[in-house]
Image: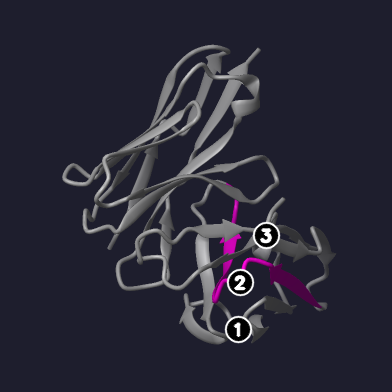
Amino acid sequence: ETGVTQTPRHLVMGMTNKKSLKCEQHLGHNAMYWYKQSAKKPLELMFVYSLEERVENNSVPSRFSPECPNSSHLFLHLHTLQPEDSALYLCASSQERLTDSGNTIYFGEGSWLTVV
Amino acid sequence: KQEVTQIPAALSVPEGENLVLNCSFTDSAIYNLQWFRQDPGKGLTSLLLIQSSQREQTSGRLNASLDKSSGRSTLYIAASQPGDSATYLCAVPDPGTYKYIFGTGTRLKVLA
């Protein structure tokens, strides 16, 4: 059973809607991530939070707005999305920086987003 | 800029075969390399993590090797089973950042 839980698993929204994706990790990690996975493309890092502070923002459009209220929870607020934003959104967590040897990254099951 | 490439993009083999998946990366200054498995519509599951000081790691029927100097890693799957059917991704951390750079994956299908 994964230690990273994402809800909802599936979401269909119109281009004028506002919705949020939620992620919760039960692993005691202090870094959390949002990744986007589109068909036939490598995983794209969107945002990274370390100790509730945003440390990476990978040139993501402002229609995606992350929020990290504490080290266990991460949200991705969505508004006025485009059809090309339809993808699998994956949340992940890790203990400190990934570049420290021995640290691995744990992924949730993902949230399938369809923008109509 | 680190780039990760995986070949082949797709592979279909009969059950019982031993097979090798390849991963190459352009910047050899990596701290570790990780192999993941992704089932359709699901998240990623970590299979093996190889530290930069290691040459290989083994878990059950899986063996991953790392050759930093040549910028390559291989994932060896012994006696493949239909349950091994999935997409396999390799990833390396971008030094000094929180980023993990992923390859596009190898989509494996093991036929019963």
Along the line of sight, which residue is nearer the eye, A7 or B61? B61
Magenta residues, start to end: A19-39
The percent coordinates of residue A17 (x first, y second) are 83, 77
What chain does mark 2 sit on? A
Horizontal relation, residue B61 to residue B51: left or right: right
Horizontal relation, residue A52 to residue A76: left or right: left
Does residue A38 belong to the magenta stretch?
A: yes
Q: Which mark is residue B43?
A: none
Disc 1, SS: loop
Along the line of sight, which residue is nearer the eye, A56 or A24? A24
Does residue A69 belong to the magenta stretch?
A: no
The percent coordinates of residue A90 (x first, y second) are 63, 61
* Residue pointed to by mark 3: A3
What chain does mark 3 sit on? A
Q: Given this view, does label 2 or label 3 mark the residue nearer the observer?
A: 2
Dot 2 or dot 1, earlier in sequence:
2
